[in-house]
Image: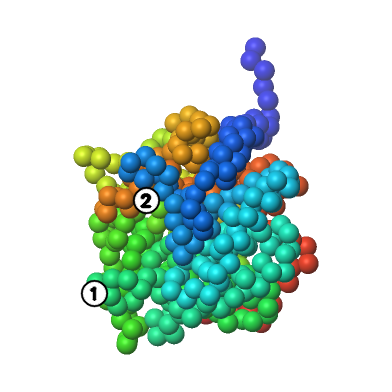
């Protein structure tokens, strides 16, 4: 005779079993970070011209470096700071300080929108971990420089100064990533102008950058006289109407941060909508590492973009904390991405890949630049994603960048208002 069990017990057991199955993703955090340490240590000791930073691999296979004004200059120092965060070994702090120092002059750079990437990944992580007062002053000055690029007529921060024969006032989806530094500046100073500018930019990006399916355009060009949109185009994607993979990842991550800092539900809904577009797209491979553009044809070439996966994975892990109904799905997807990136298919062996951590990123395919190569921002967000995965299982293990140290001044209530 078949044993009988209460129906409620069966259903509960099935639900718990499914939940456990869905969240059980193996991410080899310790092994991946050990490999990352080997690469970072080797790269940090590699001889480079003074004032230059490792960015990628050149077409001839040599190490490609950039000077501090390049938008990627802060990622390698930032990776060193993240490794110090993970290990608390003073050798990583020493290396991070050495590589961060030459970025100091960029605090006065008003010719770029990427100061968040350049200064907050480097000095920002450094200040979070050391409370060095000089680092705080540099980030605040960098925030002052960044808001000089805000135009009240368009309600956005200008992205590029080049290409004036092509566009009047270009704003790219990447710019969402530089708002975190401005929110931090309001928290530190109580000056709400940084907060207002960041939130106004985010709201106008939400309004003008997205299609009905929640994919984003890469570039929105504004009329500086009327503030209206002139055109919506791409620069690094396959086509104006296509979904450039890294752009979708920037949006996912950026709107998650905007929600964290403002608690505005519009930003949370947008981050979730972007995440759902990304994860449910028919062209997303089974390993969850996207092709460089979701709409690019399979032929003649369609390289992957490990950087898009790393950014998305890190963003998803934070977004999962604010999304109870989607928490399991977002964590599982992030885990699958990190697990893929930590596999031999993407994680480079020591003493290969010019000592970058990840292989198979795509920077700017339309201009035949950085195709299927390592890129420093892929490494940075991969490390951050691994640390966030670590924190997911044990919040006491590590502090990730969005967690403020004790004593931080919270955003004042009078600054948190609807726009």
SS class, disc 1: loop
Q: How many marks?
A: 2
User: Which tag, 2 or 1, sits closer to the chain's start?
Assistant: 1
Measured as percent of width and height from the top left, residue 185 is found at 63, 73
Quickly name the residue at label 2. Answer: 363
Q: Which mark is residue 165?
A: 1
Spot occupied by residue 294 in the image (x, y as percentages of width and height): 33, 48
Of the pair 7 and 269, the residue shown nearer to us = 269
In the picture, which quadrant includes the N terminus? top right
Q: Is residue 172 visible?
A: yes
Nearer to the camera, 291 or 413? 291
* Residue sitting at x 71%, y 57%: 129
Q: Residue furthest left?
A: 300
- Label at residue 255: none
Q: Is residue 27 visible?
A: no
Task: Give the quarter of the image for residue 124.
Answer: bottom right
Q: Nearer the viewer, residue 269 or 120?
A: 120
């Amino acid at each position: 005779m078949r044993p009988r069990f209460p129906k409620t017990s069966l259903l509960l057991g099935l639900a718990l079993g499914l939940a456990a199955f869905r969240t059980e993703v193996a991410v080899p955090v310790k092994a991946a970070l050990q490999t990352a340490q080997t690469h970072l240590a080797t790269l940090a000791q590699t001889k480079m011209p003074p004032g230059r930073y490792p960015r990628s691999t050149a077409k001839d296979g040599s190490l490609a470096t950039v000077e501090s004004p390049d938008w990627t200059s802060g990622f390698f120092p930032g990776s060193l700071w993240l490794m110090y965060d993970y290990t608390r070994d003073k050798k990583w702090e020493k290396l991070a300080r050495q590589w961060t120092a030459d970025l100091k002059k960029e605090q006065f750079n008003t010719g770029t929108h990427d100061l968040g990437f350049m200064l907050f990944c480097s000095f920002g992580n450094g200040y979070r971990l050391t409370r060095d007062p000089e680092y705080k002053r540099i980030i605040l000055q960098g925030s002052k420089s960044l808001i000089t690029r805000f135009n009240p007529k368009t309600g956005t921060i200008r992205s590029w100064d080049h290409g004036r024969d092509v566009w009047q006032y270009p704003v790219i989806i990447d710019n969402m990533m530089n708002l975190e530094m401005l929110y931090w500046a309001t928290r530190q100073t109580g000056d709400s102008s940084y907060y207002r500018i960041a939130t106004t930019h985010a709201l106008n990006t939400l309004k003008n950058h997205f299609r009905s399916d929640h994919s984003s355009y890469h570039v929105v060009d504004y009329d500086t006289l009327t503030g209206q949109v002139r055109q919506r185009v791409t620069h690094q994607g396959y086509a104006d109407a296509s979904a450039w993979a890294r752009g979708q990842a920037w949006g996912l991550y950026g709107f998650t941060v905007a929600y964290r800092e403002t608690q505005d539900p519009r930003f949370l809904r947008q981050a979730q909508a972007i995440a759902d577009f990304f994860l449910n797209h028919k062209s997303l491979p089974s390993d969850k590492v996207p092709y460089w553009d979701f709409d690019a044809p399979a032929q003649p070439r369609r390289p992957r973009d490990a950087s898009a996966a790393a950014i998305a994975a890190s963003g998803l892990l934070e977004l999962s904390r604010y999304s109870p109904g989607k928490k399991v799905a977002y964590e599982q997807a992030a885990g699958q991405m990190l697990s893929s990136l930590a596999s031999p298919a993407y994680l480079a062996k020591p003493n290969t890949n010019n000592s970058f951590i990840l292989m198979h990123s795509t920077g700017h395919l339309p201009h035949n630049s950085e195709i299927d190569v390592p890129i420093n921002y892929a490494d940075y967000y991969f490390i951050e994603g691994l640390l966030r995965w670590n924190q997911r299982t044990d919040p006491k293990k590590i502090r990730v960048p969005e967690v403020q140290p004790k004593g931080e001044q919270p955003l004042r209530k009078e600054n948190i208002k609807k726009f």
